[in-house]
Amino acid sequence: MDLDREKQHWLNAAQRAAEVGGRVLQEWRGRFSVREKSRSNLVTEADEAAQAAIVHSLQQEFPQHGFLGEENLHPESDAAECIWIIDPLDGTTNYVHGFPYYAVSIALQVRGQLEVGVIYDPTRGDMFSVRRGYGVELNGAVVRTSGETRAAAAFGVGSLPVVTGAGDAAVERFLRALSQFQTVQRTGSAALNLAYLSCGRIDAFWSSSLKAWDVAAGALMVMESGGVISGLDGGKFDIFVPSLAAASTEPLLAELLRVLGGR
């Protein structure tokens, strides 16, 4: 199988797995119990059931692949060339409260490089899909970032840690952005924020408290849709480093970094 066909095979499998996980989440709504992993960091049976269903779906097609995920899912071997990076429920607190802003996020990393990703919103039926080198699609239609270049006209979304206080640096960054952007929101799902950035629904997103499974698929979408992404310090973005700043264009990213850095 040539690489192009293989990427499409990976993507098709990821889409099917995401839909399976999304169905599990919707079936569990209203009948799960909740426990706290830490303050305000919730885990539900729905998380675990969705992850199990996703992994089962992918393992049927790719038994030699590794898996990395939020709910105690680790690659069996660090030497695995292909690793699926899975968040079965990004936006758990939203889900628990019935706020319809949560998603399934799945990405495939091959020899250290992100190759495909999907983010599926089971509430709206939105399937965001990406293949490296082929751009981003939303429900089969090609999408791009908004192209916005100015913070004053931009819709920004900032992420705050689950445990934070008034003097936290993340809160100070959020407050600085409030006065510089047209609007700033906090939504509770990094995966959907990045997907929305890739299709022009928002213009910028930043966080200092993310995990690889929160951002792997979405980061690839931003880069493949014309957007730009870096660390909060302006350095190279790494999915295994919590710091992230993303924007629709280079000029907007530069302005975002200036604002967040207090300059």
Image: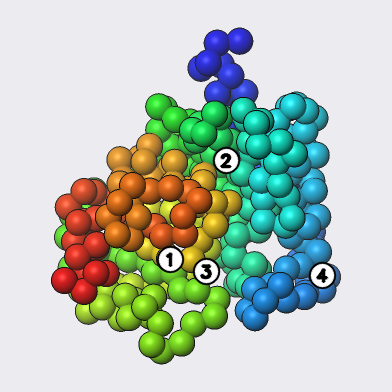
- Do the numbered discs 4 and 2 sit on residues whose CB atoms are within 8 Å? no
The part of the image, by quadrant, that contains residue 97 is bottom right
Residue shown at 38% from the left, 53% from the top: 197
Which of 27 and 70 lies nearest the eye of the viewer?
A: 70
Frontmost of labels 3 and 2 is 2
Three-letter amino acid code of the residue under disc 1: Ser
**Does the rendering let one see residue 14?**
no
Determine crowd level at label 1: few under 14, some 14-19, many 20+ residues with C-alpha closer than 10 A.
some
Q: CA distance from mark 3 to mark 1?
A: 13 Å
Query: Residue at the spot x=54%, y=29% of the render?
Result: 111
Verify CB contact (< 8 Å) between mark 4 and mark 3: no
Q: Is residue 179 left or right of residue 36?
A: left
Q: Which residue, given by chain and number where applicable, does mark 1 sit on?
A: 208
Does residue 158 appear to the left or right of 33 in the view shown? left
Report, in whole angstroms, how far the alpha carbon at label 4 lies from the one at label 2: 26 Å
Which three-letter amino acid code belongs to the residue tagged 2?
A: Ala
Between the residue at mark 3 and the residue at mark 2, the CA separation in whole angstroms equals 20 Å
Q: Which residue is mark 4?
A: 32
Q: Secondary structure at mark 1?
A: loop
Q: CA distance from mark 1 to mark 2?
A: 21 Å
Residue that label 2 marks: 107
Q: Say which quadrant the N terminus sits in.
A: top right
Q: Residue furthest top?
A: 1
Left or right side of 18 for 260 = left
Residue marked by disc 3 = 188
